[in-house]
């Protein structure tokens, strides 16, 4: 039996499975908070941002220190302790990160 990915479709499900969690993978370490914020590091560079749930997607604005804000809406899926997110409303690149203890 193989594990399968489950798409998160509501803000409530997202908060239940993902918010208040730390994730790591692919040079990333970040925490997503239920209050609509997130922060972390990517390849050692610090970032922060805000998110909202819109049209079954995690829509976030990412802020690195000296760069313009980057906004994207992502499809979120979970499988065990992993989260997979696909940029551009499911049409862009995909990354997988693992939930780790806070």
Image: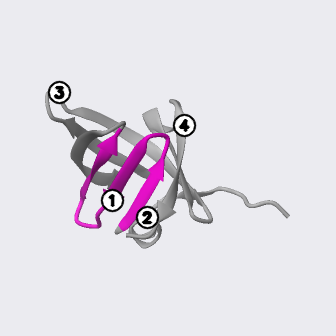
The residue under the point 85% across, 64% down is 1
> Residue 29: within the magenta?
yes
Label 3, secondary structure: give it: loop
Look at the image and name its color scheme.
Answer: one colour
Residue density around tag 2, few if under 14, some if 14–19, many if 20 or more, within 10 Å: many
Can you give x and y, in whole percent of width and height, for residue 93 in the image?
52, 31
The residue under label 2 is 18
The residue under label 4 is 94
Q: Is residue 93 left or right of residue 47?
A: right
The residue under label 1 is 32
Can you give x and y, in whole percent of width and height, for residue 52 in the image?
28, 53
Instruction: Decide which of 5, 98 is in the foreground and name it.
Output: 98
Marks 1 and 4, how far apart at CA: 18 Å
Label 2, secondary structure: give it: loop
The residue under the point 44% across, 40% down is 27
Quarter the C terminus occupies = bottom left
Marks 1 and 2, how far apart at CA: 7 Å
Query: Is any atom of residue 96 visible in this view?
Result: yes
Q: First in sequence: mark 1 or mark 2?
A: 2
């Amino acid at each position: 039996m193989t594990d399968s990915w489950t798409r998160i479709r509501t803000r409530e499900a997202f908060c239940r499975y993902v918010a208040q969690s730390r994730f790591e993978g692919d040079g990333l370490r970040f925490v997503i908070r239920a209050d609509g914020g997130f922060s972390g590091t990517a390849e050692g560079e610090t970032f922060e941002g805000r998110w909202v749930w819109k049209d079954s997607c995690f829509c976030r604005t990412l802020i690195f220190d000296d760069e313009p804000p980057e906004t994207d809406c992502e499809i979120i899926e979970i499988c065990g302790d992993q989260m997979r997110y696909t940029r551009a409303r499911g049409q862009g690149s995909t990354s997988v990160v693992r939930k780790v203890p806070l």
